[in-house]
Amino acid sequence: MIAPRRFLPSITALLAFEAVARLGSATQAALELSLTQSAISRQLKTLEEQLGVGLMDRQGRQLVLTEAGKIYVIQVREILNRLAQASISARTNPMAGALNLAILPGFGMHWLAPRLRDFAQAHPEVTVNLSTRLNPFSFQSSPFDAAIHFGKEDWPGAAYLHLMPETVVPVCAPELLDAPLDSPADILRFPLLHLETRPRGWARWLEALGVRDEPPSGMIFDQFSTMAQAAVHGLGVALLPTFSADPYLRTKQLVLASTQTTQSIGNYYLVWPEDRIETAALRSFKAWLATQTGENL
């Protein structure tokens, strides 16, 4: 049930409040919203009377937020953003709408993107919009419906669908090695490329294969794609997820430096806000992902 009308301010009042909070001036807010300054002032007064709490204080020529106003404006911006996204989805795809998905670059490029055509054919009513995000974020202050997450089940306020563990394999340019090394320890003779978010990736790979020697330092990259390109150009041996390595291995741009694979430090998950109503688009995408990875919903 929707809250009683007395608790639902008008969109005009919320837009006026948000603009003044951001700009610090009723005059500037009026220019932005194509209203008069007096109209902005009336909207603010109406909103404060409806809520029964002061949201703004005047300091000289500036309007500044009260403590209550600082808290309220964060929630108002979230609501306005979500309303705008819902309106866009309703307009572009009234049957099911869009699914705004935050992806990790390597997983998105090499595992998800090649499979999305299958999802599009099975669910033509859903439009999947992809944006790259490297780190967890707040769903409340973002336009995303879900995200691809790597690591553990440690995303605050999120529900999880386990997708797969990350299996890694060492690769390098063909001119660096004629054939895969017989002993994992031999890889220490070559320059090793490192990923910023997996600082002990090589150490774990070696330890899993019984090698206790500390790997040497080397070039550090923030994404698998740039590290793979460095390996292609002969700068060293890269430890890549199998789904990132496979395209380069098929085209012979890279070769296996060792046939030994090990599991990385975490797993891939689909995550979504647990306190938000699940859309039909998200339900369809979750069910499809489960069929692709063999996981149960």
Image: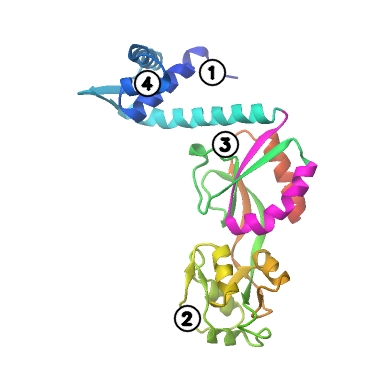
On the image, the x and y values in percent for residue 54 come to 32, 20
- Where does label 2 land, which residue? 216
Q: Main secondary structure of the magenta part?
A: helix
Q: Which mark, by number, is residue 31?
A: 4
Which three-letter amino acid code belongs to the residue tagged 4? Answer: Leu
Mark before the other along the chain sequence, 4 or 3:
4
Mark before the other along the chain sequence, 2 or 3:
2
- Disc 4 and disc 3: Cα gap in Å? 37 Å
- Where does label 1 land, which residue? 3
Relative vertical location of residue 280 with respect to residue 245 in this rendering, above or below = above
Mark before the other along the chain sequence, 2 or 4:
4
Magenta stretch: give its range. 95-122
Relative vertical location of residue 236 with respect to residue 61 in this rendering, above or below = below
Residue 123 sits in quarter: top right
Mark before the other along the chain sequence, 1 or 4:
1
Camera-near label (1 vs 4) is 4
